[in-house]
Amino acid sequence: MSTYTFVASSAVGQLDTYEAPIPTPSDGEVLIKVDYSTLGPFDLYNLDRGFYVREYPHRFGCNAAGTIEKVGANVEELKVGDRVISFTAFPPNKGLQAYTIQTPSLVAKIPDWLSFVEGVTLPDNFVTAFYTLFNQLGLPIPTEFPSKSTPPKSTTPILIYGAGTTSGQYMVQLLNLAGYKNVIATASKHHENYLLSMGATHVFDYRSSSLVDDVIKAAGGKVELVVDCASLSNTFATISKIIAPSGTLAFLAPLKLSASLSGEDGELPVEVPEELQAWFPKGVSIISVKTFFFQKDERLANTLLPVILSKFLEDGLIAPNPTRVFEEGDLLARAPNHPHMLPMSLEFLGREISKITGSNTGSARRPHFDKILIANRGEIACRVIRTAKKLGIKTVAVYSEVDKDSLHVKLADEAYNIGPAPSAESYLRMDKIIEVCHKSGAQAIHPGYGFLSENAEFAKRLEAEGLVFIGPPASAIVSMGSKSESKNIMSDAGVPCVPGYHGSNQDPDFLFKEAEKIGFPVLIKAIHGGGGKGMRTVLEPTKEAFNEALLSAKRESLKSFGNDTVLVEKYIQRPRHVEVQVFADTLGNAVSLWERDCSVQRRNQKIIEEAPAPGLSPELRASLSAKAIAAAQAVNYVGAGTVEFIFDNDTQDFFFMEMNTRLQVEHPVTEMVTGLDLVEWQLEVAAGNPLPRSQASIPLVGHAFEARIYAENPRNNFLPDSGTLLYLSTPPPTHIFAPEFEPSTSAGAAGDNGLSTLAVEPSESPLAPSLRIEQGFTQGAQIGVFYDPMIAKVVVHGRDRTEALRMLRKALDEYHVVGVSTNVEFLRTLAGNPSFIEGDVETGFIPKHFDELFPPLAEPSPALLAQAALYVVLRDIAPQSTSTHPSPWTTLASRRFGGDKSRRIITLQTDDTLNTTITAEVTTIDGRNFDITITTPTQQAHFTSVPAELLADRTTLSTTLEGRGLKTTVVQQLPPAALPASQAHSSMERIHLFADGHRTSLVLPTPQWLLSLSSEVLNAHKGGLRAPMPSLVVEVRVKPGEKVEKGQAVVVLESMKTETVLRADVAGVVKSVGCKNGEMVEEGRELVDIEPLEKEEGEEA
């Protein structure tokens, strides 16, 4: 006899596999070969709580969809091959197995246009909806649908509470088809348009604080007929305020006496307890709907599924709800966390059986990939390569033409050019990356962050090519890629979202009305994209202010993302950005690696992050982590992901913001407090292995910070900069990877749903402070205009926040860059700000503390100016020889015929808007000691017999000033060779001094003799326009021979994603154009030469 294997519960919370013979149908029965089945709420209570289980093993399956394989005697209406769906809630023949025996009364034929996956959730939900309305509430069953006659009480208000549930949606449809004209629904906001289209006359957000008043107003008084589809004790509390004293309430049993459908420690009574009954007026009738009893109704027992439902489907009267099928993960792990319908294919069930029985792969760990390709550049590419090398995995780099000498290219085992500098022609070219993958033999692709890391189409193409995407499934990327869809999914999963409108109606008047409902201030946000694009805050509650912000947000969104759809949300005025690092595997396991605080931002982008978030209680940490895990499981997530929350500083409430479906820039702070390598975890999961650790074993040790070093000018609104890293010196790192910690030994209490393993305090056990430098560039590298201007990340870890912050300040003091403007000094000021030290952070931290973070520029101290002058003098003295055959000519200092004393006047200027001129008089006493007089517009200072020498590295000046021994780093920066000498700072030599955590830049003015030599060149090119920095030519707006006016736009450049317009300095005629659209030009290059118009007689010269 042929047998099959099925999964059943062998004890509370435990699954096992069993063998059974393929059954033969008896008289009046059919055998269904199942393609899809569902776990319903009752099944989940059975599995998780043993609810309704009379004996083990206990089978599952609320519904089944498949094909009739055999037909017993006396069955006329069904035949072999019919496509059917069946209500299989009755033991023992449940549907979550390869075969199920059913009677025709529980089977409905489905039309060819309806797929099994769409139809599988229909039977029990349709039965529940129909039975509740037309049996339990006593509404008359129409003779036909849609009803041609008006039913009694057609205008009587009927409230469907929880109409967003599948049963609730069918109830709304059925009431509409039966002719009822006053159907009030409560649901989450994103169900509103759908329910209105299905026949609801009013839809209210069940989370609204005005819900009770809204329903009573819409009903014209308290409601007589109520159906509760949620059946939670807190919904009863709300309904008791809405229902009329003589009303009828039908709830779908069992009642859940807790906020969780799984019910942590709550009970699951079928009837209403007395203490809840007492909430209602004495005349209220409360009905417990037990769907299984529908067969006791002679009108429905043999017709509801085979006749009524089949007819509804045949005539297209019922719209099946959209279904998300669970095809990945672990059944046992998923069940308690998905208390709603869990549709799944029998193919998925087969994989479950394989895992449980150990057949096929068994429990053996799968090996790592032999070779991976990193589809990225910069520090993240280097980061992935380092972990791959540690694991013995070969790496393949891809690079654009401008990145051919980059660090990630040098570190990889192989490297391939994939095109020109623009991302669209290189790092975003899926076809070229896939081609390199095949050519190199790489088995998997790590996308890093940015570029293609959150591109669902890329993930799909890799799968089609037989390559592994080291990231989440494409479906998760799609779901989380839209801010509106992701928030709808999160609402359904019980994850709190900011109150707002996330629908598709984009009418300005409608959106303004929604904003009024939400309450000002509001935030308008593009549903696609990020980085602050398409985002506007509206503080003033007027239509004019709202429409102005709306139009601006839509324009920017359309330009940035090709889509101008926006959502409107409540604007939280003192928010923090707190995010949770989650990790999930293909077996359904998901864990939290704790939270990070990323509140301090500029231009809506993070610049400093820390873990854990300051000031969070263990209980709040547990709640955040639990919601983040639920968010990941709601979309069948796999790999590393970050669930971002807005945390309200004033109320301590948190709301889902978005989920980033990739490894985050700030992941190292999580590694430092957990002792884990997240890239290694990504590779393990992508290979098909389970998560390396369970939730209970994940440590939380100490405190970590990450500071992002950007090429940008904080005092110029953080405008990006580009150029060559002429000098780069960093503090020596103590670690390449995070220091490892012993696994945690926390364990959750029985029945707490894992919350106790999440409610942890950071351990502050003694540990050595540590420092990592995550960088993708070395000295001499070019920070170009085509990519993000991040140079590196400084990551520190200490036993507590105070120690980690001290480490960060010291590391930033020692991080020295010359060649581009950076935010290093700003970060150092931020790390020393008293409010930041206290952990009083919010996303508006920078504007709130602007004056403290950007104090007025002070004149350099005389001691520092003296060091600058000494450097200029000493650098011109030839360094002493290190020859192995010394002679007086190489070992003695320089000598003068008139004596060793000499005097030199050095002029300096501050390289800032003050442009202060300083004079330094340096008298050399004996070549090693100096007298210095510093004269500034405000003071004069004298230093005598100052010993000084320039050390062998030629950048370290050793002096003793005012009794203080100093070693100061001084770096010279020569002007671009292409720039003629002038009085512009860009054409002068600069020197940069790094002392006491500050970089001071000074200019050596061009000597007059050189200015006179270059004056003819400058006069000849008076109308010449030069590139102020390395740039991309976006548009040339003139051509030779064209007449231009002074101030007219001539050339548009782009550098670091920021446009600069060059305008004519004089009125004249274009003599020549030295660039073209799309060309990359170096700093100082002449782009357009304009010959000035001759002065007319009488005009001022």
Image: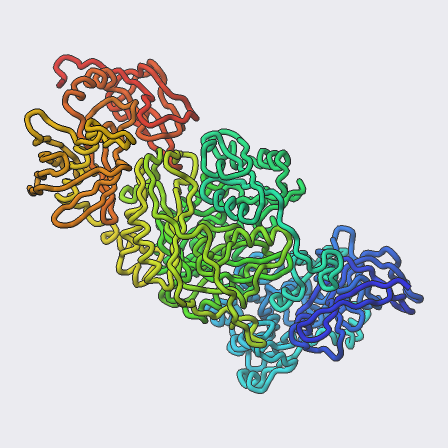
Q: Is residue 640 above or below residue 1048?
A: below
Q: Nearer the viewer, residue 729 or 747?
A: 729
- Residue at the extreme right of the image, as rendered: 73
Left or right: where does residue 352 sit relative to residue 617? right
Q: Is residue 906 above or below residue 711?
A: above
Left or right: where does residue 781 sit relative to residue 107? left
Q: Residue at x 26, y 60 (%)?
A: 834
Q: How is the image coloured?
A: rainbow
Left or right: where does residue 938 sit relative to residue 708? left
- Residue 222 visible, this orientation: no
Q: Position of residue 278 (x, y in %)?
A: 54, 86
- Residue 271 visible, this orientation: yes
Q: Nearer the viewer, residue 143 or 14?
A: 14
Q: Position of residue 872 (x, y in %)?
A: 18, 33
Q: Nearer the viewer, residue 27 or 586?
A: 586
Quarter occupied by residue 925: top left
Q: Position of residue 772 (x, y in %)?
A: 41, 51
Q: Quadrant of the C terminus?
A: top left
Q: Quadrant of the N terminus?
A: bottom right
Q: Position of residue 845 (x, y in %)?
A: 31, 56
Q: How many marks?
A: 0
Q: Is residue 910 above or below residue 202?
A: above
Q: Is residue 306 above or below residue 523?
A: below
Q: Residue at x 67, y 42 (%)?
A: 466
Left or right: where does residue 740 sit relative to residue 229? left
